[in-house]
């Protein structure tokens, strides 16, 4: 957990207009709904009332006692809300003392927290289709990562990759057999991209390298994860594997999002 300095707290207060106990445009009810829907967190829980019951005090307490990954996730979502609805209107006596640029110091703080975080990022693990099984799969991965248990997440990350590659192949008009291993699915997807789009050589090399990485991931899942009665990899190695696979998934998301030169 990050220990926030007074300057950090001022940065957060300025970004979300928390100086008088408020948080953006939230009422008590809408703030509760926001935290429940976005993060499955009960912001009204007693643990967040340690320093007071106002919205701002509960949020500050939450940020102080939560892990870095969750803190940055909440700060980013709060900024998205501010960008959408704007801050709470300021009292005239405060208008002249409010920083005109509150985004830069906030995102500098977020970058500093993320740079020192021991928690892997899970932003590449998206809910790419309305599917109850997928929803629980992603939630399970996120729970293990937030609990600093990357080794426990590897089995489900492999399952997620199996579902993701099958989804991608079918989205491009291909077919995928349930018995096809992960690296074979990735090879099929790379072949589809090569035929459909003009992809730069360096990017195609990266995509082809992912086939061998996923083939190795098959072995980790079968012989070094909780999928079976295995001796699992240690946390440092599990973190590296999780980050490496996530980087590939993040790259694939970028390819799908921008059409890759189309």
Image: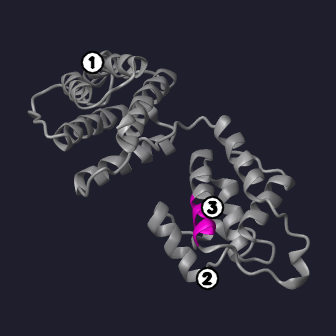
Q: Which residues are magenta?
A: 77-84
Describe the element under mark 1 as helix, strand or loop: helix
Query: Is 81 in the magenta?
Result: yes
Describe the element under mark 3 as helix, strand or loop: helix
- Give the percent coordinates (x, y) of residue 102: 77, 59
Residue closer to the observer: 52 or 246: 246
Instruction: Residue 232: name its quadrant.
Output: top left
- Give the percent coordinates (x, y) of residue 200: 39, 22
Residue closer to the observer: 49 or 73: 73
* Residue 183 located left or right of residue 123: left
Looking at the image, tell me whether mark 2 or mark 3 is earlier in sequence order.
2
Point 35% across, 25% down: residue:
199
Name the residue that disc number 3 marks.
79
Describe the element under mark 2 as helix, strand or loop: loop
- Give the percent coordinates (x, y) of residue 181: 17, 25
Q: CA distance from mark 2 to mark 1?
A: 50 Å
The label nearer to you, 2 versus 3, is: 3
Which label was assigned to residue 36? none
Point 60% across, 34% down: residue:
118
Name the residue that disc number 2 marks.
27
Instruction: Residue 174: name its quadrant.
Output: top left
């Amino acid at each position: 957990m990050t220990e926030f300095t007074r300057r950090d707290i001022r940065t957060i207060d300025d970004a979300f207009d928390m100086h008088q106990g408020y948080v953006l445009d939230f009422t008590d009810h809408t703030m509760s709904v926001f935290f429940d829907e976005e993060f499955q967190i009960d912001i009204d829980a007693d643990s967040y009332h340690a320093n007071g019951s106002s919205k701002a005090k509960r949020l500050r307490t939450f940020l102080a006692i939560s892990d870095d990954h969750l803190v940055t996730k909440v700060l980013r979502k709060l900024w998205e809300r501010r960008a959408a609805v704007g801050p709470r209107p300021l009292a005239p006596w405060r208008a002249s003392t409010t920083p005109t640029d509150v985004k830069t110091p906030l995102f500098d703080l977020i970058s500093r927290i993320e740079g020192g975080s021991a928690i892997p990022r899970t932003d590449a693990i998206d809910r790419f289709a309305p599917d109850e099984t997928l929803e629980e799969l992603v939630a399970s991965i996120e729970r293990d990562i937030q609990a600093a248990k990357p080794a426990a997440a590897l089995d489900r990350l492999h399952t997620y990759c199996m579902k993701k590659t099958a989804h991608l192949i079918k989205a491009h008009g291909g077919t995928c057999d349930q018995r096809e291993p992960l690296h074979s699915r990735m090879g099929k997807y790379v072949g589809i991209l090569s035929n459909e789009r003009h992809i730069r050589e360096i990017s195609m090399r990266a995509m082809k390298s992912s086939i061998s990485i996923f083939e190795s991931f098959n072995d980790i899942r079968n012989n070094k994860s909780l999928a079976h009665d295995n001796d699992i990899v240690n946390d440092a190695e599990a973190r590296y594997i999780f980050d490496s696979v996530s980087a590939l998934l993040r790259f694939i998301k970028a390819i799908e999002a921008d059409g890759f030169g189309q």
